[in-house]
Amino acid sequence: MAAPVLAPAEPAVATAPGSGPGGLRRRLSGRRTRFGLLNATPIVVYLLVLFVYPIFSTLLLSVEGEDGGFTLHWYADALQGTNLDILLATLRISAETSLLSLVIGFLLAYWITRLRPLWAGLVMLVVVVPHFISALVRTYGWIILLGDHGLVNEALVGLNVPGAPFALLYNEIGVVIGTTSVMLPYTVLLLYAVMRGVDRGLTAAAASMGAGRLVTFRRVYLPLVAPGLVNASVLCFILCLGYYVTPALMGGPKQTMVAALIDEQVMKDNQWNGASALGVILLLLTFAGLLLLQLFKKVGMARRNRGAA
Amino acid sequence: MKDVRIDRRLFLRGVGAVAAGVAASSLAACGTGSSRSAGSSGTAGSSKTIVVRNSGGAYGDANQKALYEPFSKETGIEVKVININYAQMLAQIEQGRPQFDLIDNSMIDFVKFAKAGATEQLDYDRLKNAKNAGIAQNLLATHAVGKNYWGSVMAYRTDAFGGRKPGSWAEFWDTKALSGNRALQHVDADIPELEFALLADGVPLDKLYPLDLDRAFRVLDQVKGSIKKYWDTGALPGVLLGRREVDASSVWHGRLDDLIKQGQPLAYQFQGARRQSNGWAVPKGTNNLDAAYQLIDFSLRPEVQAHFAEVYPMAPIVPAAYEKLSEEVSANLLGSSKNLATGFDADVEWWVANDDVVTKRWQEWARV
């Protein structure tokens, strides 16, 4: 089975033998280690300056009162009233998007694994290339497609579909269609990588032992690709949390997301503290997503071990 | 596996390389506009370059053509341009080393700049063309001077409403007589359009401020059901009207000119237009004061003002400029005597004082 793409590398220290304090010093004094540390210095400095420092200053800003003292006022402000609504809408839209792009991505990736290599490459290209078109152009394209007088609604009206034209833009449906299309390449790539690693022999074996297609899918194929599904959905969710352009262009006022709120606070209100608090909350939500990912992995591992025992 | 497929690792490496390239180019993009010219840091007397901040785009191009180039030709002073936003400007001024000598921005932002102590008080003795030129008093502020009028007007599809033309905000609000979708501006784009609601409810033009918030939001409720989209970028009203998503919308005046020229059935309606103005202010910390005053004064010459209006649909603030323009061009400008009378000036002082409260209330109102 292919290793999940997102699996973090095992921490090197934990696997190295001799973990006592004496062992640590001995290892640090080794020539190879010293050389390694020297090599790592530029990247460590780079990360400290460009990553750790800005994050910490954001953290500090978010707990700094107007008089310079410590306060949790900005967090309280972020977690009530309209701001809370916007936070919840962000979570809701992200969840809807990751669910939808997971389902569509699954079907698409599965289909691609069944294609001949040339076609597979071509379809992959079709999935990925729109990703490199500017988001603005893409979303204006959606207006032409999904508007009241857009292609989809004109076709539905032409076919006398009851209820047409439907409101497909400037509401949650519009936003989720837009965000899903942006997320699709990620889910397809991740799932395709995992699906390609699935040994066809296993499903064939299951079939030869009398399992129907549904049972084979549920009990053999799905568990094999499950890590990919978890990775894809969590990645999708995390990326969605920071969405900005699509909700603004394809949604209504009820679909304002946190990123737009942060932008407004910084650019319009010059309110860096509140924006920092929102940024930190967003970061924590991302961590929560990653934690969830680890949890899923642990549960999956435990279940597999139990099955093996 | 029998098939030879795309090598995953190779593929991912390719994707990674592309991602790295995108990241690198966006980093590079962050750096644009930050290279202050060596010439501008010289002493005031000898400097031959001035750095002006403007908002770029078509407006920036128009300034280049109608203002900076003639100015450079006459004075020999080169004009360099940077496009950075309000927050960046304020941060630079507060650190004492602004990259720019002169700011071209909306007058409403200059109220905020002045409150933050970021701009110099203007010496009107050095602005010959501002004196006794008939410029509106609210554009001759202590820390900023007006430049060109812009504003929000109504726009509609001429083929909608069975040929009837909405002639006022009251008719825009009357969704029974003129049924069809509407669009209004989102609070993200600019100050909300509460004045239009009050005008629709019968408040006279000269009695708008201070705005009666309760009344304005109550009146906004009446039209809310017909609002399809709150537009947040200046180009969107044109797209919405052009794609027949809405039949009437507020719009920044000038944004439909190209579409109308292309023959789209769209028109502006000037009754109840909300005027604002771009203006000039000098940041604290510049050592290029002389050139800054020269450029401001140059921009207020009637012929320069008129030329700018021919290039870009922003209106002169100097009345004498209209004598140099044709009837037809004047009729489409917010500052012509006819349009001055049927529109009103946004009270920027009131808006700066109340923006936070109104923005918050607008967001709550829109989400319900």
Image (cartoon, coloured by chain):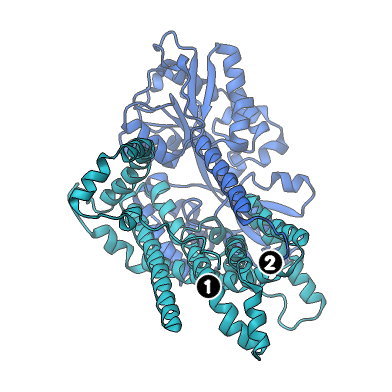
Q: Is residue A289 left or right of residue B315?
A: left
Q: Amino acid at mark 1?
A: Glu
Identify the chain of the residue marked 1, using the numbered disc in the image. A
Looking at the image, is A204 positioned above or below residue B284? below
Residue A187 left/right relative to A28: right
- Please determine whether, in this image, residue B66 is positioned above or below residue B73: below
Rendered image quadrant of residue A111: bottom right
Q: Among the chains, which one is cyan? A: A
Q: Secondary structure at mark 1?
A: helix
Quadrant of the image occupied by residue B309: top right
In the depicted structure, whether residue B253 falls above or below residue B204:
above
Residue at image position (55%, 48%) is: B343
Q: CA distance from mark 2 to mark 1?
A: 35 Å
Q: Which residue is mark 2?
A: B1
Tag 1: Cα neighbours inside 10 Å, few (<14), some, or many (≥20)? many
Q: Can see residue B180?
A: no
Quarter of the image containing the C terminus of chain A? Answer: bottom left
Q: Residue at x 65, y 70 (%)?
A: A168
Q: Residue A260, percent across and down? A: 46, 56
Task: Specify the amino acid type for callout 2.
Answer: Met
Instruction: Name the spot of residue B361 as percent of width and height, x first.
Output: 39, 63
Question: In the rendered image, which residue does mark 1 sit on?
Answer: A96
Q: Which chain's colour is blue?
A: B
- Which numbered disc, 2 or 1, marks the residue closer to the eye? 2
Nearer the observer, A195 or B365: A195
- Element under label 2? loop
Q: Between residue B73 and residue A111, name the one nearer to us.
A: A111
Quadrant that contains the N terminus of chain A: bottom right
